[in-house]
Image (tube, rainbow, N blue to C red):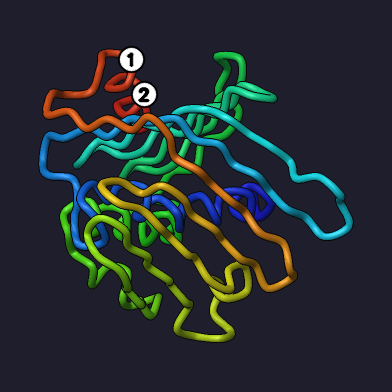
Amino acid sequence: MIRVLARFCALLWLCPLCCLAAGPQGSLAAGQVLRGHFVQERHMTGFNAPLKTEGHLVLSAGKGLIWRAEKPFAVTTVITADGLTQASGGTETTRLPAAKLPFLSHLYDMLGGALTGDWHALESDFSIATTGTDKAWQVVLTPRQDQSPIAMRIRTITVTGSKFVDHVTIAKPDGDADDLSFIDQTLSDGPPAADEAAAFDSLAR
């Protein structure tokens, strides 16, 4: 269980940042869905080349996040107010109910706050420094407490973008880092597709 939580920690703290639709002060409105392609490179001390993952994401206001890794392995992670699931090859391999893990509830509260434009949901855990303009901006998040669980895994999160988030770097205390690039992002006002809605609803069972 601890390994699973550690594996998803950086992704979960990233969720609020993926949904900014109109610069650092923007957010998804109720009923909107953000979709896009992501490329993640994990730089690890002692390795010459980064570990590269590609896939697609779906963020639905009021519903949650679907993070589909497609290369090199197909793994789908779904995060909602009810918890987190992971599936590989169509088979569910992990289910973490939020009711049993307050840690997940807190992280989803941050996601929900960012989706609705409530930056206070992030400010309790991070100091936030914003620079640039709506057309070219940067946000740097730094954990407020040096010995907090967040600070033990994340040194800083740097987000850059224009209309959408373009790039995120998660720097870790041990020198490792995750670089994520977001490509071909689209914002729609319709409901999630049938398969997306089914993925969100599956966590309520």
Residue at 17 percent of width and 28 percent of height:
188
User: Is 139 placed above or below 168 here?
Assistant: below
Please give the count of numbered marks on the rendered protein.
2
Classify 10 Å Cα crowding around label 1: few (below 14), some (14-19), many (20 and above).
few
- Give the SS element for disc 2: helix
User: Which of 133 and 102 lies nearest the eye of the viewer?
Assistant: 133
Q: Which residue corresponds to mark 2?
A: 199
User: Which of 205 and 49 lies nearest the eye of the viewer?
Assistant: 49
In three-dimensional space, the C-alpha distance between marks 1 and 2, rounded to whole angstroms, equals: 6 Å
Picture quadrant of residue 82: top left
Is 158 placed left or right of 1 in the picture?
A: left
Residue at 53 percent of width and 71 percent of height:
156
Counting from the top left corner in percent of width and height, residue 192 is at 23, 23
Counting from the top left corner in percent of width and height, residue 149 is at 56, 73
Residue 76 is tagged as: none
User: Which of 193 and 159 lies nearest the eye of the viewer?
Assistant: 159
Residue at 62 percent of width and 53 percent of height:
178
Residue at 18 percent of width and 64 percent of height:
118
Counting from the top left corner in percent of width and height, residue 152 is at 63, 74
Classify 10 Å Cα crowding around label 2: few (below 14), some (14-19), many (20 and above).
many
Picture quadrant of residue 32: top left
User: Is 107 placed above or below 67 here?
Assistant: below
Residues at marks 1 and 2 touching, judged by CB atoms closer than 8 Å: yes
Residue 195 is tagged as: 1
- Which amino acid does the dot numbered 2 rest on? Ala
- Which amino acid does the dot numbered 1 rest on? Asp
